Amino acid sequence: MRDFAQSDDVRVQAQLDRLEALSLPEGRLGLDTMRALLARLDDPHLSLPPVFHVAGTNGKGSTCAFLRAILEADGKRVHVATSPHLVRYNERIRIAGELVSDALLADLLEEVLDAGADLTPSFFEVTIAASFLAFARTPADACVVEVGLGGRFDATNVIEHPAACGIAALGIDHERFLLAPEDGVPDDPMARIAFEKAGIVKPGCSLVTLDYADGPTLEIERAAMAAGAPLAMRGREWSANVGTGIEYEDRHGRIVLPLPAMPGAHQAGNAALAVAMLRHQDFVSVSEEALGRGVVDARWPARLHRLADGPLTRGREVWLDGGHNRSAGEALARHFAGQRLHLVLGMLANKDPLAIVDPLGDSIASLSAVPVPGHDWHAAGAFGENAKAFDTVEQALAALPENGLTVLIAGSLYLAGEVLRLNDEAPD
């Protein structure tokens, strides 16, 4: 699958065209290619500011957003590497608080692609190498790095001495890669997912997690023990009780934080995880005031995101969410509990087509199926006999009755990016 990045800048587009020609050799696992590529670039990953490395099935991007917001609220300069992008490739690389400029991006990609021309690196390996190159060359106080897929074999896992590693919520996703048969790995799917995510743990570096079922918990405990890494798990080394605020407590004491401005009850857990990561490391100090301000200030587009009034929404209440697995569907169901809504759904063909539909159940007043631009997607029939097919999101919205019901557009971050573009809400 390709990311189909596009740019209005001619120099950037020339490098993105080279990126799009790359593909991950079928069956290749490991970090050898990534390490070889970085070696040709003088190993920038060894010269990064303190790194907060975040894995997880759901919520890792939001946790990164909370980390960045808290650190910046404390006056820190923060580099951030996240994926995928929504509208512009530049969103993947934030240097000391600012999205990478087109001019610098073109130079970075050209340098990395030229250095690794004979190594056949993947799209993501080149992206992460470019990110680390930029981060090593620009002074900052911290880095926030989101795992792309899994953890154990993810290109970001070349980081050797992070300030702290974090694992957000776990769920079944990317089964083709994360549940591929392999000797010496757990048989239970959820335990295997935990095993892969816990692969980011490093010797002596704190591993901070949420709470999980027994199987995943055991795998995370094993990984931490094998690495000699201090493990801080919610419900044991730290707690977060959510009411009118977040009552957080760990060995350092108890603090009360405001609720996040980001919609969704699950975001309080992601915020607490970010706080726990910051309080279970000794590389970057953050004030209690900054913890509270950052929790409120954090934003993460296309995750339970109410769209502004714009060219696409035209006065309707329209929500956007890029979630595409059952855990995301359950989170949406909790948020919209008791409401009827019009669902506009576009899902990649390799995803479970009912992952969003089943949890929302009787809340769905109508279901409109739309393509995911540039990708293979599920046709309307995959969502049930009542789903109606439309060629575009604009057509689907125009066909909805004016009955005052909320509209939810969901199913893919690639679709979410197209929606943000159409509504003039490109992330900055």
Image (cartoon, rainbow, N blue to C red):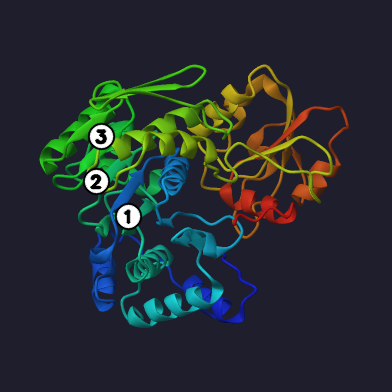
Q: Residue 402, position in %: x, y?
A: 88, 32
Q: CA distance from mark 2 to mark 1?
A: 9 Å
Near mark 3 (Cα within 10 A), the count class, few <14, some 14-19 or many ≥20, is: few
Q: Say which element carries label 1.
A: loop
- In this view of the protein, can residue 170 be seen by the observer? no
Q: Amino acid at mark 1?
A: Asp
Q: Amino acid at mark 2?
A: Gly
For this rendering, which residue is in front, 286 or 243? Answer: 286
Marks 2,3: beta carbons within 8 A: no
Q: Residue 422, position in %: x, y?
A: 74, 55
Marks 2,1: beta carbons within 8 A: yes
Q: Residue 271, position in %: x, y?
A: 43, 34
Q: Residue 92, position in %: x, y?
A: 48, 59
Q: Nearer the viewer, mark 3 or mark 1?
A: 1
Q: Which residue is mark 3?
A: 187
- In this view of the protein, can residue 109 be seen by the observer? yes
Residue at position x 25%, y 61% from top?
A: 31
Q: Nearer the viewer, mark 2 or mark 3?
A: 2
Residue 253 is labelled as none
Q: Say which element carries label 3.
A: loop
Residue 199 is labelled as 2
Marks 3,1: beta carbons within 8 A: no
Residue 154 is labelled as 1
Q: Amino acid at mark 3?
A: Asp
Which sits earlier in the primary sequence, circle 3 or circle 1? 1
Which sits earlier in the primary sequence, circle 2 or circle 3? 3
Q: Quarter of the image for the C terminus: give it.
A: bottom right
Q: CA distance from mark 2 to mark 3?
A: 16 Å
